Image: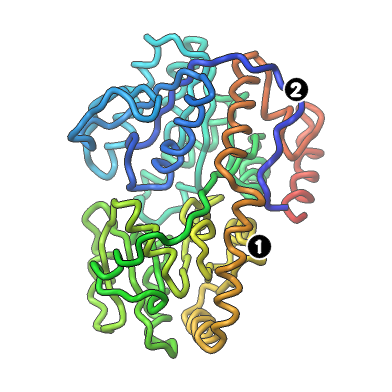
Amino acid sequence: MSESVELSAGRPGNRKLRIAMFGTRGIPHTNGGLETFFMEFAPRLAARGHEVIGYCRRSHFKDRPPSYKGVRLVYLPSIETKELGTPVHSLLCAFDVLFRRVDVIFVVNVAHAFHCLIPRLFGKKVAINVDGLDWKRGKWGSFGRKYFYWNAKYVGRICSKGVITDAREMQRVYWQELGTPSTCIAYGANVETSSRPEILKQYGLEPFQYYLIASRLVPENNPDLIVNAFQQARTDRLLVIAGAAHYRSEFSERLKRSKDPRVRFLGHIDNVEHIKELHCNAYGYIHGHSMGGTNPALLKALGYGNCILALRTPFNSEVLGDYGAFFDHDVRDLAEKITQIEDHPEVAAEFRRRAPDRIRQAYTWEKITDQYEELFQQLAAGEDPTRIHSTVRCLAGDKSEHSSVAARTATE
């Protein structure tokens, strides 16, 4: 089973809530999947009559409008370094929200679990989407990985009724490795098609004459493996890389030294329309992400109708299913898969045709908003959504039962 959990039991009603959200750079912003999540999700809640507050990192916004599509925006400072930007801003948010009358606080990123102690000590109801396995990511040093791990280890105690995982496999990891039950709600995506293909000319590209990578240039996304494989593949098309490291990185600088004229680095692109056209007109999209659950970049690629080659991981397999092809963490294997797609354009065309169906089936933003809205209603009413809606339903405190059912549901 790879679809997100259907929230249906224990619906407490349609009470209009006051909801505060923090943990991202803010909205509107295009630098990451969590920012995209808030941009799609928060306005939908506001449109349903809820009062939504979105916190923003002041230094990321030259213009600071008071609202965005019905969401009230609050700008707080941060220390803009790789290590301190997010945690310092979120700490300030955790204190600021104490002085606001809200029913539920929604936080993203497990790195903020300890920050959630502050509103929890004052009786606030907090839900946290833990996002990915940050304690295993290579971009963090030893201290950073330990900090992420301890946040993950104790998040279930801090937010005992509000832990959210975004994939069945992530739900299994949190239960079996950390003993933390969670509600499983995925991310969403939109289904869109090309409307301005002439935008490609700005990048010197022609429709379907290139493969696309759209990700941060960090080790866990494996851009080095993809570049090396592409150099060995039998193709005259280009490999276009839209993304940057967002901080000084020897890894990304070394990657950019590729002498293959078929490999082009476009850097970070913050124009949403341009990103859409790059996706919709790509011959294939190569997804090398190895961490995280329901990856927003993979969902976006599906919604834009890409022929997807994805790294074979439990998370990518859960999302993609048979709507794309997989490659192993091996340069030769990916090179062979690219060559196969080159030799069989009808296969690539069929993957592109079917890809949006996966979003319509399981990952529409309306469906995701329905699930979060119901979870917030339950949390505000004093219920425990992690027990009501967890896929791994069990008797309270029966970890052996919980574990065995988790193992079964993760493989369905």
Q: Position of residue 122 (x, y in %)?
A: 47, 10
Residue located 26% across and 78% down the image: 258
Q: Which is more N-terminal, label 1 or label 2?
A: 2
Q: Report the Cα–Cα distance between label 2 and label 1.
A: 30 Å
In the picture, residue 182 is in which quadrant?
top right
The foreground one among 7 and 359 is 359
SS at mark 2 in the image: loop
Judging by the rendered image, the residue that carries numbered circle 1 is 321
Q: Relative to 352, say whether 47 is above or below.
A: above
- Mark 1 burial class by Cα count in 10 Å: few <14, some 14-19, many 20+: few
Query: In the displayed structure, does residue 370 sit left or right of residue 311?
Result: right
Q: Quadrant of the C terminus?
A: bottom right
Q: Relative to 288, say whether 384 is above or below.
A: above
Q: Which color scheme did the rendering employ for the protein?
A: rainbow
Q: Position of residue 187 (x, y in %)?
A: 54, 44
In the picture, residue 378 is in which quadrant?
top right
The amino acid type, in three-letter code, at marker 2 is: Gly
Q: Position of residue 263 (x, y in %)?
A: 30, 77
Q: Relative to 284, say whether 40 is above or below.
A: above
SS at mark 1 in the image: loop
The amino acid type, in three-letter code, at marker 1 is: Gly
Q: Give the number of marks.
A: 2
Residue located 79% across and 39% down the image: 400
Outermost residue toward the left? Answer: 62
Q: Which mark is residue 10?
A: 2
Q: Relative to 306, say whether 101 is above or below.
A: above
Q: Which mark is residue 244?
A: none
The foreground one among 403 and 332 is 332
- Mark 2 burial class by Cα count in 10 Å: few <14, some 14-19, many 20+: some
Q: Position of residue 278 (x, y in %)?
A: 37, 64
Residue located 48% across and 41% down the image: 149
CB-based contact (under 8 Å), mark 2 and mark 1: no
